[in-house]
Image (cartoon, rainbow, N blue to C red):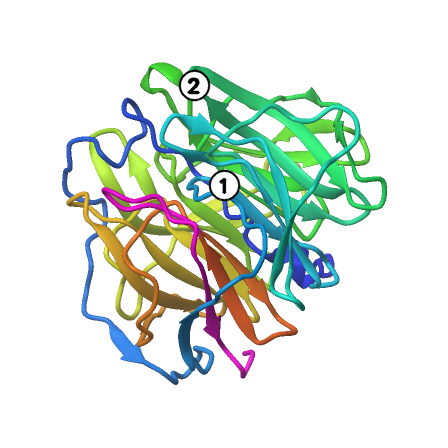
Amino acid sequence: MPPAPPMAARMVAILALAVVLSGCSPAAQASPSVMGSEPATTATLGQSSPAIVGWSELAVAGAVPAAREDHTWTISPDGATAYLFGGRDGGTVYGDLWSYSLGSNTWSAVAVSGKEPPARFGHNAAWADGIGLVIFAGQAGGDFFNDLWAYDPATNAWRSLPASGSLPVARYGSCAAVGPDGRLWMSHGFTSEGQRFADTRAYDFVAGNWTDETPAGDAPIQRCLHACWWTDDGALRLYGGQTTRTIALGDLWQLTRGERPGTNAWTQTDVVQGMPPARNLYAASHWGDGALVIGGQGADGDYLADTWWLADSTTAWEQVDATGPSARSGAELIADADGGRLLLFGGRDSTVVFGDLWQLAVPDQP
């Protein structure tokens, strides 16, 4: 198995996933989820979960990004800076780039030189070694994207990345993360006229080409507004989202990479303990040897505020007993390993788009 990537590259590129009034929309007619909720284990300290101290809201002096949802927020490999890009507030779509200093708790608007990617929401973002901050896909009004852009802090410039091969159809609401092989893996999503996807593709930064990695056989149904992350043992996990006539999904899948082309395989995992309520457009981040899932929108269209932990080594969910930000969807979560905390920014509920910043103290990294 190839060595695991650096923690920053393993983190979920949380997917600032879009909500539109038609198509892949949490406001659509609610219907039963694919998998419902079951009794959960609620614990501050669990067998596999990290020690949780609790949430606190951070006051930030100086300039701050406008309130927004469906943005991305990605931490650099050195853990010093996190870059926020895009998002929206109602009909206002953002294309701005902000840097957040984890050491000083300050925001700075980044005035880049040269050409910039079009404003968008519902795109994916990840950090690629030797490349920088990478964004893919997204939406702005009636336009959907399948372009790739990279921002290099050393040059303070964006560049459009070449793309050949089996290009993904333009979309938003997909998930993407850099895998152990150094490629950007993308799965599922939504585009105009109600079309959802169930494909999985990988982009090679060296060759500049996309490869269709969709496995034969069982696979997660077409969906959007979900997240995916790589586990420490090299598997891609995909959870929840939304599909046609089903506002929130609660199923958990795992992609195992084959040694030869065409031998990848999806497996739906049997949950051995508990299960979060079905949800879409939640925030998630890989942390240590597992992932935290926070908030989102549930099967009845309700906004959620709960926090869940899923270790890489098991399919046993644990609910974290930590009261924090108000219920919301479309927020962004990043892991600050050096600081022993996770940070959450933005999101929305039925009436408010948020611009608040919260931290969840996790002093004992698992």
Residue 169 is covered by the magenta coloring: no
Instruction: Give x and y (percent) for residue 50.
Output: 47, 79
Q: Is residue 120 above or below residue 63?
A: above
Residue 47, located in which quarter of the rendered image?
Answer: bottom left
Give the main secondary structure of the magenta stretch: loop
Neighbour class for label 2 at 10 Å: few (<14), some, many (≥20)?
A: few
Residue 360 is covered by the magenta coloring: yes
Q: Earlier in the sequence, mark 1 or mark 2?
A: 1
| Residue type at numbered disc 1 | His
Q: Quadrant of the N terminus?
A: bottom right
Q: Left of 319 or right of it: where is 117?
A: right
Taking depth in this image into account, of 68 and 232 the one nearest to the observer is: 68
- The circle on residue 262 is none
Instruction: Give x and y (percent) for residue 348.
Output: 33, 45
Q: Quadrant of the C terminus?
A: bottom right
Q: Is residue 120 above or below residue 350?
A: above
Cα–Cα span, label 1 and label 2: 15 Å
Q: Residue at x 48, y 25 (%)?
A: 139
Report the span colored magenta.
346-366
Instruction: Give x and y (percent) for residue 321.
Output: 31, 76
Taking depth in this image into account, of 268 and 80 the one nearest to the observer is: 80
The residue tagged with tag 2: helix, strand or loop? loop
| Residue type at numbered disc 2 | Gly
Q: Can residue 263 be seen by looking at this rendering?
A: no
The residue tagged with tag 1: helix, strand or loop? loop
Query: Which residue lies most toward the right here?
Result: 155
- The circle on residue 71 is 1
Residue 185, located in which quarter of the rendered image?
Answer: top right
- The circle on residue 141 is 2
Q: Residue at x 43, y 41 (%)?
A: 68
